Image (cartoon, rainbow, N blue to C red):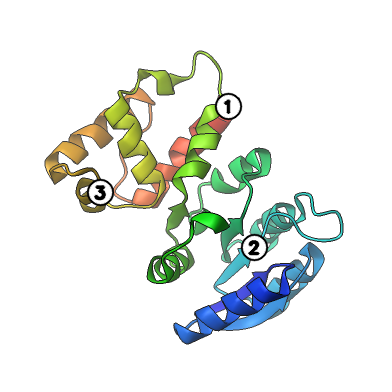
């Protein structure tokens, strides 16, 4: 597996590069701005780009805008956003394109190295990895008539776990439920949101996010 890292903080950039290398992931380029990220991805064609949201020169949303450009020009490259911030507008656009291979994790909540490496591999393989706080903020901005209001508290918990990329068995373990109970909750969620069931977890998550985007 080959990766490109876009991060302006030298220590964090070098630390990520070393961490990934120690876990069998080849880092083919490290950059500190959006333009260099796009150039590196076009040149190296990595499996995944790990991107900070706020990059030079303005430290606004350059990272996410570069990620969207990569999605347009090199759609097979997976994108994992690793940031301190949730940039809602571009995050919805990135997450809701239906392609999979997308993640959004918050730096200060990544405390387990094996889980982080597993998330990188999952996204590179076409899955998703979404921090629950990212999901919560994306869900927070919605119309009063948002169909999410139809969901029970337990269904909201299941939906958040779905967004993390968990399988039904993983959700059952996390929420201390039976797999059968989780399957019923998932079916109910998809029905209430008018979304067809899917055997592929990351697609159903992206479908939910796409639906939420349409409600804004």
Give the camera-side residue of 163 and 56. 56
Label disc, if present, on residue 207 of the rendered structure: none
Label disc, if present, on residue 51 of the rendered structure: 2
The residue drawn where x is 58% and y is 75% is: 16
Which one is earlier in the sequence, the residue at label 2 or at label 3? 2
Q: CA distance from mark 1 to mark 2?
A: 24 Å
Which one is earlier in the sequence, the residue at label 1 or at label 2? 2
The residue drawn where x is 48% and y is 86% is: 22
Q: Quadrant of residue 127?
A: bottom left
Q: Is residue 163 positioned above or below 115 on the image?
A: above
Left or right of 156: which side holds 103? right
Q: CA distance from mark 3 to mark 1?
A: 26 Å
Task: Please identify the residue farthest to the right as the structure is shown.
Answer: 57
Q: Quadrant of the C terminus?
A: top right
The residue drawn where x is 42% and y is 23% is: 148
Report the residue marked by disc 3.
174
Which one is earlier in the sequence, the residue at label 3 or at label 1? 1
On the image, the x and y values in percent for residue 100 come to 48, 54
On the image, the x and y values in percent for residue 208 come to 44, 36
Residue 187 in view here: yes
Give the camera-side residue of 114 and 92. 114
């Amino acid at each position: 597996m080959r990766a490109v890292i876009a991060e302006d903080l030298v220590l964090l950039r070098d630390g990520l590069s070393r961490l990934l290398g120690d876990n069998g992931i080849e880092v083919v380029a490290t950059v500190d701005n959006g333009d260099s990220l796009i150039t590196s991805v076009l040149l190296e064609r990595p499996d995944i780009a790990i991107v900070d949201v706020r990059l030079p020169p303005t430290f606004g949303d350059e990272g996410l805008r570069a990620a969207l450009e990569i999605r347009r020009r090199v759609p097979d490259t997976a994108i994992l956003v690793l940031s301190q911030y949730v940039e809602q507008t571009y995050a919805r656009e990135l997450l809701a394109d239906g392609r999979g291979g997308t993640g959004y994790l918050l730096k200060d909540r990544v405390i387990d190295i094996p889980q982080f490496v597993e998330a990188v591999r999952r996204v590179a393989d076409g899955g998703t990895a979404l921090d629950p706080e990212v999901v919560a903020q994306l869900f927070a901005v919605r119309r009063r008539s948002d169909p999410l209001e139809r969901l029970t508290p337990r269904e909201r918990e299941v939906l958040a776990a779905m967004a993390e990329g968990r399988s039904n068995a993983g959700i059952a373990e996390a929420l201390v439920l039976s797999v059968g109970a989780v399957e019923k909750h998932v079916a109910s969620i998809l029905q209430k949101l008018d979304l067809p069931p899917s055997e592929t977890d990351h697609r159903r998550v992206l479908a939910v996010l796409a639906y939420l985007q349409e409600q804004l």
